[in-house]
Amino acid sequence: MKKIIIAIDGPAGAGKSTIAKKIASILKIKYIDTGAMYRAITLKLIKLKTNLSETDKIQEILQSTQIDFMNEAIYLDGENVNLQIRSPEINNSVSAVSAIGIVREKLVAIQRQIGQSKSIVMDGRDIGTNVFPDADYKVFLTASIEERAYRRWLEMKEKGFQTSIEDIRQDLIKRDQGDMEREINPLCKSKDAIEIDTTGKDTRRVVEEILLYIKEKNNVII
Ligand code: DC
């Protein structure tokens, strides 16, 4: 198979990571969760008690920060932070951190580098519009706010975080607004992406729709 890039964008809780992981596993290619990268930087800035207006300090921190993916886990400066980055505290701050230009520059550069050498499925908010505008396949996933809040609540519960669905609903509304209204590379659907509303659909059905889109676009047998 030739090197391919599949970009999956959409708001929080639309099912991006579950679907992207599944597609990557079926096609035997790498999955990159770019939201996890913004979360990892947020964790580091919180740990270092950084004020988000301290641009010089943030720049310094970014220069000495190492982010890696290994066996489906994200490592921040060598430490597995998979669980820590899903906390309500990170949920509350990540949208503001991801609106900072120098943070985006650093992470987008890493994302492009990863996609240079191998086939990937990458999910996020600006993958099809900014990180890989020439991606081979672009998908924009959406779902109703109620369903997105319920899915996130289930995920949080499984990870041991206690919150209410209503708190998560409010967080998602606030985060969507921040992600869509920020000046640099806001969340939006790329003109050439297919849009799939995942409300009421199980993972298998959405994965099948995406595989069909890939097959039809490329005339390939998967
Ligand atoms: O997908 P997620 O909820 O883990 O993403 C966390 C935050 O990171 C989200 O609120 C917006 C930001 N983000 C971004 O700005 N650009 C991306 N490509 C991925 C995530």
Image (cartoon, rainbow, N blue to C red):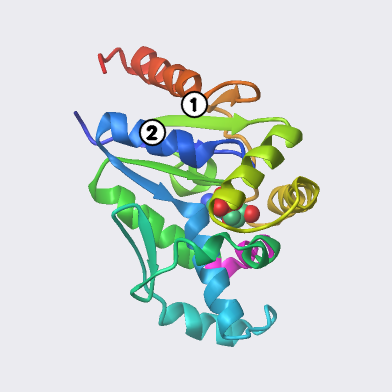
Q: Mark 1: few, some, or many residues within 10 Å (few <14, many ≥20)?
A: few
Where is residue 72 shown, x and y percent of the image? 34, 52
Residue furthest to the left in view is 1
Q: Do the residues bearing badges 2 and 1 touch, measured as CB atoms within 8 Å? A: yes
Q: Nearer the viewer, residue 104 or 70?
A: 70
Query: Would residue 41 be found to the left or right of residue 20 on screen?
Result: right
Residue 31 percent across, percent down from the top left: 36, 44
- At 55% from the left edge and 49% from the top edge, which residue is drawn? 158
Q: Which mark is residue 203?
A: 1
Image spot of residue 178 (x, y percent): 74, 55
Q: Earlier in the sequence, mark 2 or mark 1?
A: 2
Asked if the magenta segment contains residue 100, the reply would be yes
Residue at which label 2 appears:
22
- In the rendered view, tell whether residue 160 sits above or below residue 25: below
Tag 1 secondary structure: helix
- Main secondary-structure element of the magenta-colored stretch: helix
The relative height of residue 20 versus residue 158 in the rendered view (above or below) is: above
Residue type, mark 1 in image = Thr
Q: Secondary structure at mark 2?
A: helix
- The vertical placement of 53 against 141, above or below, is below
Say which amino acid is labelled 2.
Lys
Q: Which residue occupies the foreground of this view, 173 or 53?
A: 173
The magenta-colored residue range is: 94-103
